[in-house]
Amino acid sequence: MGGEVPSPRRLTRALSSDSTSYLPDEALHLVLAHVDAPRDREAASLVCRRWHRIDALTRKHVTVGFCYAARPSRLLARFPTLESLAIKGKPRAAMYGLIPDDWGAYAAPWVAALAAPLDCLKALKLRRMAVSDDDVAALVRARGHMLQELRLDKCSGFSTDALRLVARSCRSLRTLFLEECSITDKGGEWLHELAANNSLLVTLNFYMTELKVAPADLELLAKNCKSLLSLKISECDLSDLVGFFKAANALEDFAGGAFYEVGELTKYEKVKFPPRVCFLGLTYMGTNEMPVIFPFSASLKKLDLQYTFLTTEDHCQLISKCPNLFVLEVRNVIGDRGLQVVGDTCKKLRRLRIERGDDDPGLEEEQGVSQLGLTAVAVGCRDLEYIAAYVSDITNGALESIGTFCQNLYDFRLVLLDRQKQVTDLPLDNGVRALLRSCTKLRRFAFYLRPGGLSDTGLEYIGQYSGNIQYMLLGNVGESDLGLIRFAIGCTNLRKLELRSCCFSERALSLAVLQMPSLRYIWVQGYKASATGLELLHMARPFWNIEFTPPSPESMLRMAVDGEPCVDTQAQVLAYRSLAGQRSDCPDWVTPLHPAA
């Protein structure tokens, strides 16, 4: 048969007509097997009770965007054949120290609910959640015999005792992910247990943790796990990993380690990476250590240079030897010259991340990233799908160039730093309009500026041209409440919104929320807050929780004494759709707001 294959959404609409009533359940099972996107699945489940039931029986993966949005027992009862479950906890602001450790997002209720049902569950991912040793022990008792994937991403509260239990009990584990977790180190036995007991491991990641590494355990892991493809570790001198690299013949992705003796190239002459390595991230690498990468630089597909000591010139030299990169992660020390080399060399680049670098203002002006570098990348790397960049300067023309040449973008994030005294071209109203009009595939958008960076007109443009965007972070945008309301009217598909350092009133925030029909979650810090937050009750609606965090008196006192603003001097608002009702574990300093009966 010829002809175009219909999209899942068109397929859903076509099959939702009355003519499908005669189709047997088996046929609908087969149809829904081709509908993977969560929103398409959600639409299919609303067609009728029959479709709702079949969706529930055939759904293999669920992502809970916020752990308080659903009751664990109810969700797990609805999807009894889940194979994979992902749960997100604290707001993203927790990654930047804006959410206290004792805020909540405890894993215990979810782990307890996993004990009985879900015979098929093989994979669990928790992100930014508080996980205790007892939680891990309960999970291992319930699912350890069949758990193949455990991802604890930026979680805290557990120790290596829990990891040792996982290593002993989860013999089918393929993936253990612990990146950026806060873990209490009670000894390295967990890694030895994992190496000795598991022969199926494909991915092990404890990058950016403080766990100690025994090179002999890594070598044992490589010998026992012939299928090990990805290893990301904490700090360990690379010269001690020679034996591991010799044994890990299948390894493709390596990050971590460290060059402890910077400038002592002879110490690292024996370091030879496995022949298949094409994803690489090294720590504390300096100019003299770069030759370690040169022999296979042309085959690299991903390069992470965020935690190196490389200069702008070093970046230029190294990246010029990497024409096949798909992913590049750097600090803004790369400068505009380095990005020019990226644009000239890396024609296959899909993802570019430019993190904030040295805080020295002098270095920032000399080596920071501006419109010149971003324009060079946009012109040269036209297959880019993801850009996240901290910049010192940006213009409307640069944003227009990104929109013109990078129309495959699905995720764009830009932060304009405030160290430079003058910015060339503000406000950025016309530039953001041009970018959004051209980049119609965008689903995630972050635009964090400095005061005056975007007028009410520009904010209205964002709403008008962001019809497909589902997540948005905005900072220092707009001039008045009217700008926010006009922005909200255009955001028909926006599901998650974060606002920081804006001039809006509580009433305007409430009215804006009511204008966004798809919104499921909003977090705000830095606005015209009242003492009680009662104006926020105007956004109240069924299944909508509102939590207000006033600035603490202690922090206000510290600010008065020190003269420096504290993170918690600004009020915060978190509001979200929930089928679980008000949460029961709010800390004392968070005020749940309820409309009067």
Image (cartoon, rainbow, N blue to C red):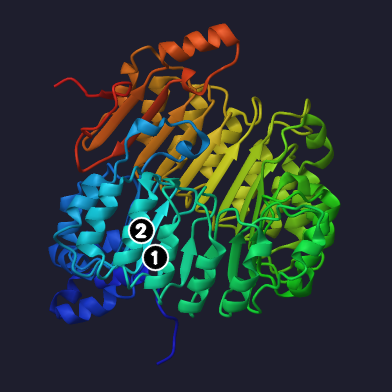
Q: Secondary structure at mark 2?
A: helix
* Neighbours of disc 1 within 10 Å: few (<14), some (14-19), many (20+): some
Q: Is residue 539 above or below residue 495?
A: above
Q: Which residue is found at the position 56% from the left and 64% from the top?
A: 215
Q: Quadrant of the N terminus?
A: bottom left
- Residue 278, x across and y down, in percent: 64, 72
Q: Quote the CA–CA distance across marks 2 and 1.
A: 7 Å
Circle 1: element type: helix
Give residue 164's mark: 2
User: Residue 486: image x %, image y %?
Assistant: 48, 32
- Please state if 28 lies on the left or on the right of 437 as rendered: left
- Is residue 70 visible to us here? no
Work out whether 325 lies above or below 507.
below
Q: Amino acid at mark 2?
A: Arg
Q: Give the residue number, with chain letter if any, for mark 1.
A: 193
* Label 2 or label 1, whichever comes before in sequence order: 2
When the figure is inspected, residue 287 is found, relative to residue 20, above or below; the finding is: above
Quarter of the image with the C terminus in it: top left
Percent of width and height locating residue 532:
33, 14
Depth check: give the residue in front, 46 or 13. 46
Label 2 with label 1: CB-CB less than 8 Å: yes
Answer with the quarter of the image where residue 533 lies.
Answer: top left
Could one spot residue 294 in this view of the protein?
yes
Q: Position of residue 100 (x, y in %)?
A: 41, 30
Amino acid type of the residue tagged 1 in the rendering:
Glu
